[in-house]
Image (tube, rainbow, N blue to C red):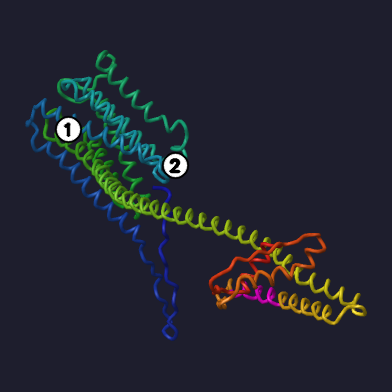
Amino acid sequence: MRNSKPILPVEDDNRLLVGMGTRDAHRSTMDPRRWRSLLLAAALSTGGIFLALSISSIAELLPKLQIKDEVLHAVFETLGCMLALGIAGFLLMRHGESGNGYMMWLACSVLVTGIIDAFHASMALSNESVCLRSTAQLIGGLCIAMIWLPERLTQTRLAKVLPKILAMAAGLFGTISLIFPEMLPAVLTDGRFTLTAQTLNFTGGIFFLSGVVYCISNFDRSQYTIYALFATYCLLCSVAGLTFMFAELWSPGWWLLHLARLGAYVVAFKYVAANSSAEYMFLVRSKETLGRAKVRAEESKKELEWVNKQLETSVQKANLLAQKAEAASQVKSEFLTNMSHELRTPLHSIISFASFGTKKYTNAKPEKLLDYFSRIKKSGQTLLELLNDLLDLAKLESKKVTFAFEPTDIGILVKSVTNELDTLLSERNLSIRHEVSKFDGEVTLDADKIKQVLRNLLD
């Protein structure tokens, strides 16, 4: 409740009426927070005064009327005890949240009151049961008064274990009251409450009244419902303590005190119920959101699996392409090696016959020189064909190669290739025996391509 800052009223500037010699009055607009705080204070004051007057007046109007019902009294106290323990448990779960430190003192108040009331409800109405009820009123109010302490104290280690300490102390006090009732002070004599009982309840009522003042003075419009509920809770408990002196045992006013305390628990439990419903709806929505997120996660998982498969396929294709590229590179290297040999063969033939011609042109017969020049010409033509083949290879790679199929004599084609290699063979002391079988007819083929194959084989 203390984390909210008060909003100051907005004041209009003073304005001077020129020519009239008068000034507008200083005006201010009331902050909505202040309005709600005043309305809450007015409503609680009216209700508290009406309830207090009802309890004090009914004793004078019906002085001899008594409603003695032990079972109904036990039901009232047991129901209040159960509500108190449920409220305390919920508040203890929430007090650790930022700005909710005040809930620890509310929880301690309700927790101690609920535990002592449990012992009070378990026994017949007597001096010890009235003492327990009066003590619960005092300690519960004292815990409420602690709400005025700085909020930082609720974050200490002692504050975190304080509810447990108070719960054990309340349980120990109730147990001692059951075992050693003679140790308790006299609070009930001849069916009337003593000054001790009245003092305990009146003091507790004053403490609870300080809780009402706190809720109103620290009003937060963002938590209007919480402040209104707990201010009402403190007011009902306060009225029950302050008017205790006007009530007599089993009188209508005494029953009104029980109704006021039970009403306080019901009002506080309304906060628990509202927040529990809100949290339940939040959990339901969270579950639905989680379900949708799970569906989207499954869809994303399937998409990821599909992407992984596509990636694996792409990697496999890339590896295959890399292997093909490596194989193509190797083939290219082999091709260049073979082509270099093919180009050397006609070039070597040209150089050799040209060398023979230059050396023997003076003594050589014209027929011999003509043969040399014819061989040089053929070797030059072969070299030209090889270069054309390179161009054809480029066309083949670009899928633009063409073939020239025509009838050709295989014997003549093989002879022309071996003639190209005569000079190279003679230098290496090699010879080729050429045997050609007889064919019934010519073969249709691309002569240039077949010659290239023969040169590769013979080389």
* Residue sitting at the far bottom: 19
Q: Nearer the viewer, residue 269 or 37?
A: 269
Against 437, is 148 above or below?
above
Q: Is residue 376 shown above or below 121?
A: below
Q: Residue at x 47, y 35 (%)?
A: 156
> Magenta residues, as a range?
384-395
Q: Would you identify the image quadrant in which residue 161 lies?
A: top left
Identify the image quadrant of residue 101. top left
Q: Residue 418: where, in percent of width, then height?
A: 71, 68
The label number, if any, that marks residue 151 in the structure image: 2
- Indicate the position of residue 79 as horizontal and vertical percent values: 18, 32
User: Is 327 placed left or right of 25 in the picture?
Assistant: right
* Measured Cα–Cα span from mark 2 to mark 1: 37 Å
222 inside magenta stretch = no
Predominant SS of the magenta segment: helix
Q: Which of the two marks, 2 or 1, is nearer to us in this view?
A: 2
Chain-order first, disc 2 or disc 1 = 2
Is 269 on the left-hand or right-hand side of 73?
right
Q: Position of residue 412 (x, y in %)?
A: 65, 73
Residue 305, image x, y percentages? 42, 52
Which three-letter amino acid code belongs to the residue tagged 2?
A: Glu
Of 82 and 180, nearer the camera is 82
Using residue 74 as the reference point, say whether residue 22 is left or right of it: right
Query: What residue does disc 1 label?
Result: 247
